[in-house]
Image: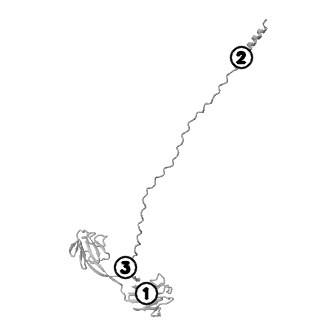
Amino acid sequence: MIELTISRAGEADRRMLLKGGAYSLGRHADNDIVLDDKAVSRRHARLLVDGDVAMLEDLGSGSGSFVGGRAVGERRLQDGDEVEIVPFVLRVRAGAKPPTHVVDVLEVVEGADAGRVFDLIEDELTIGRGDDQDLKLDDHGASRGHALLARRRGTWFVRDLDSANGTYVNDQRVAEAPLEQGDRLGVGESVLVLGQQERQGAGPSAAASGASTPDLPAGAPVVERVAVPARPPAPPPPAAPPTPRPPVVAPPPPAPPPQVPAPAPPAAAVAPAPQAVAPAAPNVLPWLLVGMLVILLFLGGVVVTASAP
C-alpha cells in the first residue's frame, strides 16, 4: 500500500492511502486525486499502484511532472520520492499500513453460535433470541429479550431482563453485574466470553471526533481527514427582562342597537265636520196665488158694489 501526502503552500496537508489500481490526477473534479489549480492540466498524470509499487505517468500535461527536479514521462517511484506538479508536492511512502483499532468483543464459545464474534460498538446492546435484538442468538434457551449490555465509563455491565432461564456471569446467576475481560457470560445454553480484537480503520472513537476514514471499495483513494477542534459554544444571550403583562381590562359593553322609532299608529278617520245647512226658502207661491185670489175677489166685490143701483 502507498501513502501519498499532498502539500501546497498555505494549505493543510492531505494524506491518502492508495490500495491498488489506477488513480488519475488533475484539475478537473472527476479525477481520483484532484489538484485544483490553473497551473495543473485537467488530465495531468496517472499513478499505477500495485501493492507497495507505484508508477507515475505524465499524460502530456502543459506544465509537466517532476521527480527530483527532473521532468519525467514515466517513472517508478521509490519510497521517499517527491513528485512536483506545480504548485503541489506529492510525497510517496511505500509499505504503508492502514490504521487499526481495538474493539471489545463477545465471542460465543459454547452453544449453537459457537465461533461467532460480536463487536461491541454501541454503548447499549440487547442480547436474546428475538429478531429485534442487537446480538441475536440461535438459542431456544434464551428469552427473546434476554439481557441488556451497557458500557459505563469504560466498564461493561450486564442486566437481566426478567429472562426465563436467568443470566449468569462466571456461572453465578445475576440480576446485574459488571463484566471484565475474560468473564464468561451465560445466556440460555450459550456462553460468551468478553475480550478484545484488532480491527482495521480509525475506530468508532475517531468517527465520533470526525477523524475516521470511511470504508471505500478496493482501488479507491482513502482520504485521511484531520479532526478540527470543536469551537466552544457561544454563551447564550442574556435573557430579556420579562415584559409586564398589561392588566386585563374588561371589554366595554356592547353598544345598544339603534332605536328604531315605532311606526306611528294609523290616523283615525276624521269625520267631516257637519256643514251648516241653510234653511230651505219658504215656498211663497201658494201664498202668492192665494193673495192674488183674495185681491181678485176683493176687486170683484168692489165692482159689483159699484154697479149695483
Mark 3 and mark 1 in contact (Cβ < 8 Å)? no
Where does residue 119 sit, x and y in percent of width and height?
A: 30, 77
Query: Can you identify the residue that label 1 sits on?
Result: 6
Q: Secondary structure at mark 1?
A: strand
Amino acid of disc 2: Gly
Amino acid of disc 1: Ile
Q: CA distance from mark 1 to mark 2?
A: 169 Å
Q: Nearer the viewer, mark 1 or mark 3?
A: 3
Mark number displayed over residue 209? 3
Residue 145 placement: quadrant = bottom left
Mark 2 and mark 3 in contact (Cβ < 8 Å)? no
Q: In the visual, does 251 lie left or right of 116?
A: right
Neighbours of disc 3 within 10 Å: few (<14), some (14-19), many (20+):
few
Q: Nearer the viewer, mark 1 or mark 2?
A: 2
Q: How is the image coloured?
A: one colour
Q: Secondary structure at mark 3?
A: helix
Amino acid of disc 3: Ser
Q: Is residue 155 visible?
A: yes
- Which of disc 3 and disc 1 is earlier in sequence? 1
Q: Is residue 302 above or below residue 78?
A: above
Query: Can you identify the residue that label 2 sits on?
Result: 291
Q: Nearer the viewer, mark 3 or mark 2?
A: 2
Q: CA distance from mark 3 to mark 2?
A: 158 Å
